[in-house]
Amino acid sequence: MSSHSNPANPPPAARAGRRQPGAAPVPQDAALGLGRGPGLGLALVLVVLLSFSSGAVGEAQAIWPFDRIFERPPLAERAAELLAEAIRTPTSNPPGNERALARKLAAALGRAGIENGVLDTPSPDGGSPRAAVWGRIRGTADRPGLVLLSHLDTVPADASEWSVDPYAGEIWDGFVWGRGALDAKGVGVSHLMTLIEIAAEGIELERDLIFLATPEEETGGRAGAGWIVKNHPELLEGIGYLLTEGGGIQITRERDGVRPPIWGVTLTEKAPCWLELVARGRGGHSSAPTLDAAVPRLVAALDRIRRFESPIRITPEVAQMFASLAPVASEWDRAGFQDLAATLANDEGFRRRFLGNPGQNAIVRNTVSITVLEGAPKTNVAPPTARAQLDARLLPGERCSDFAETLAQLIDDPSIQISEILSFSTRASSRDTPLFRAIAEVADRQLQPGLVVPRMIGGFTDAHWFRELGIVAYGFVPRALTADEARRVHGVDERIAIDTLAESIRTTLDLVRTFDAIEAVDAAGAD
């Protein structure tokens, strides 16, 4: 997996039996110990035995090529190869085309003896074949089941900007490289390998454990997780809990800094409110501009939107989040984090510092970004219509229709129509659950204990589809990343360290078992 040579893991040409540059040719019969009488074959056996008896294991492995036929490769190696293969199966959305990857993951589950299936999902307008994949390990009791949720699709990647092919799934320098390594094929492989390890070790759980990887998350999830929730309720029968992307373990750049790792567990998300603005006006030749042309009307409307700021509102989840972060905050912000709403209202210096951070500003108010513009197809044409699309994100409890009406009043131009592209409401999951306690317990017994922080995030995941059913859904993947590493999500040269991937699987397995143990203690206490 590394670029360095290793006698026990020779380069591909050597493994294939091909002659290396500069090496002397070896007759085939001599290479096999044949055709020279019994003496040479006996000598080879003696060399192997003497090598093992003298402790020269590395040298013996170099001459005896069959040492791993009956040996299970290390977890890190198996996980890296599976992730690399997933990356080599492109699922860039659009168009998605997730069915091929769903079948490969189902096959991996099947080889491990795990119950599994592939669900074909809608392909709008006869598009590429799409599908979800699931696997299930049945529990020995009837405790509420746990779903490990990920998604198969990825955002596109521009290969010209990358230092490696984003769809080659390269394993190099201790990393797996490619689109989806972090978001979210790496998550799916971590979940899948957790089930495989449980099956291989014969671990019995008192609840069902379900692996579920869906299509179409990157474009809203309606034809993916949303469709599955509506059309396959049997898959979620008896499910009480769910873990998915949206949170994780944030570590310092040095990985051994004085600040403890932050175990961020997402309880809720801002709601998307994607809007389209259409301006209409007089069209014609652009050499004679008019005051009622569509593009200038649209630009004026967008300028008003750009300057608009929604009022600040601190939700209970955000208040909990910053109160939990107060112990590791800078000295001048610690008191403000402990009572966020009051400090933002009364301390101007704190307010400027806090709102000057775009991420913090985004989780205390509704926000809107201008993302798409469309006017004339040619420079010398004044089009009769011009369009723009907005990505607004609303705090929990707010409605997209109300926000659209606020913008319409702000624009104050009846020639501009506003319509919804995508919107849904959001709910919060409680932190007062055995699963949250299990995360805290696992964090506390790490070599460097973690600080567990309940969160709200500005983005959205597929978790909301399941929260609407009353399932406790947390955004949490036990994967340790620095801020620089996390910024590769949706970015250039996305990658994950193989050690990080393997540790994520081990920690997920520990979390699943701890969750079971906590509920067993709770049940015994109730009796």
Image (cartoon, helix red, strand yellow):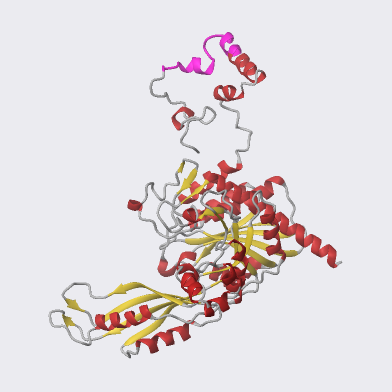
Q: Residues in magenta?
A: 24-43
Choose top left, top right, bottom left or bottom right for residue 408. Answer: bottom left
State whether residue 223 is above or below residue 52.
Answer: below
Residue in front for this viewpoint, 527 or 313: 313
State whether residue 186 is above or below residue 472.
Answer: above
x, y percent for residue 487: 46, 57
Please state, as top left, top right, bottom left or bottom right, where the C terminus lies in the image: bottom right
Residue in front for this viewpoint, 245 or 261: 261
Is residue 29 shown in magenta?
A: yes
Residue in front for this viewpoint, 335 or 74: 335
Q: Is residue 280 visible?
A: yes
Residue lying at 18% horizontally and 77% vertically, measured from the top left: 381
x, y percent for residue 69: 60, 32
x, y percent for residue 93: 42, 62
Residue lying at 53% horizontally and 14% vertically, measured from the top left: 34
Is residue 407 shown in magenta?
A: no
Residue lying at 40% horizontally and 63% vertically, measured from the top left: 94
Residue in front for this viewpoint, 249 or 35: 249
Q: Locate residue 523 relative to residue 494 in the image: left or right.
A: right
x, y percent for residue 506: 64, 49
Residue lying at 61% horizontally and 12% vertically, measured from the top left: 42
Q: Locate residue 512 relative to residue 339 in the image: left or right.
A: right
